[in-house]
Image (cartoon, rainbow, N blue to C red):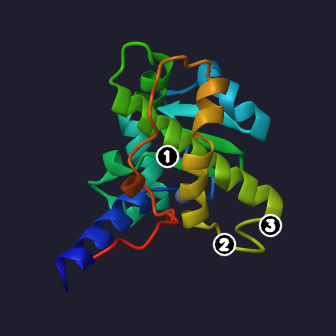
Amino acid sequence: MSRVGLRIGRIGFLAALVCVLGFPASAQGAVRSSSFVEHATARYRATTSCYDRPDWAALVRSGYPNLRGHETEVYGLWRYEIRQVALPARGCTALERWRAAPAASVSLWIFVLGHELTHAEQSDLYNAPWSRPFDEVEADCGGFAKFARLKFDLGITRRLPPPPRYFGRCPLKQAKPRR
Ligand SMILES: [Zn+2]
């Protein structure tokens, strides 16, 4: 349609790629836990697992077969059946090595963590997805809202801004632009 429509579609696609996964996936090989990331997820009674490249691809495909070939664009999954925040290993590594990793990368993965942990709250509050579907917009808002607290819980003392607002679909209250 318009350039604006294209832009929104693209953002929607990007943001839709942090999501939820219900059923248990097949046996995993190189999956490790991250006690570092669990400093932030423990409050939500959630564990954290970090999947290396092939295992991540297999996990994504098991839930979203249509994303074959786009597995690396999926940043995180909330595995509600086992209360696990699933991250690709590169995400865990960026968080664990926050001192040296690029700032934008560390910010991105904190946001993803906040998104997935909002899904954890949705599981608790409205028994999602059995009673109510997961709300992706609310999860994006949670990614921004939880940013400072998660950064603190992780012990990341570096100055980091949250990712740019367009990364999520959380609506921003704003004054009407003057023309
Ligand atoms: Zn999501």
The residue wearing badge 1 is 76
Rendered position, 132 above or below 68: below
Residue visible at 62% across and 23% down in the picture = 154
Between 6 and 129, the one lying in front of the other is 6
Quarter placement of the C terminus: bottom left
Residue 83 coordinates in the image, percent (x, y): 71, 45
- SS for callout 2: loop
Q: Ligand 1: give its quadrant.
A: bottom right
Give the residue type at disc 2. Answer: Pro
Residue 25 seen? no
Rendered position, 116 above or below 50: below
Give the residue type at disc 3. Answer: Tyr
Quarter placement of the N terminus: bottom left
Between 57 and 123, the one lying in front of the other is 123
Give the residue type at disc 1. Answer: Gly
Q: How many marks?
A: 3
Check if mark 3's residue and mark 2's residue have beta carbons within 8 Å.
Answer: no
Q: Earlier in the sequence, mark 3 or mark 1?
A: 1
Give the distance between the C-alpha atoms of the residues marked 2 and 1, in whole angstroms.
18 Å
Rendered position, 111 above or below 93: below
Queried on whether the Cβ of the residue with tag 1 lies below 8 angstroms from ligand 1, the answer reads yes
Q: Earlier in the sequence, mark 2 or mark 1?
A: 1
Queried on whether the Cβ of the residue with tag 3 lies below 8 angstroms from ligand 1, the answer reads no
Give the distance between the C-alpha atoms of the residues marked 3 and 1, in whole angstroms.
21 Å
Q: Residue 126 bears which disc, if any?
A: 3
Rendered position, 10 above or below 162: below
Residue visible at 73% across and 74% down in the picture = 132
Residue visible at 38% across and 45% down in the picture = 57
On the rendered structure, is 116 left or right of 125? Answer: left
Q: Residue furthest bottom?
A: 1
Q: Mark 2: few, some, or many residues within 10 Å (few <14, many ≥20)?
A: few
The residue wearing badge 2 is 133
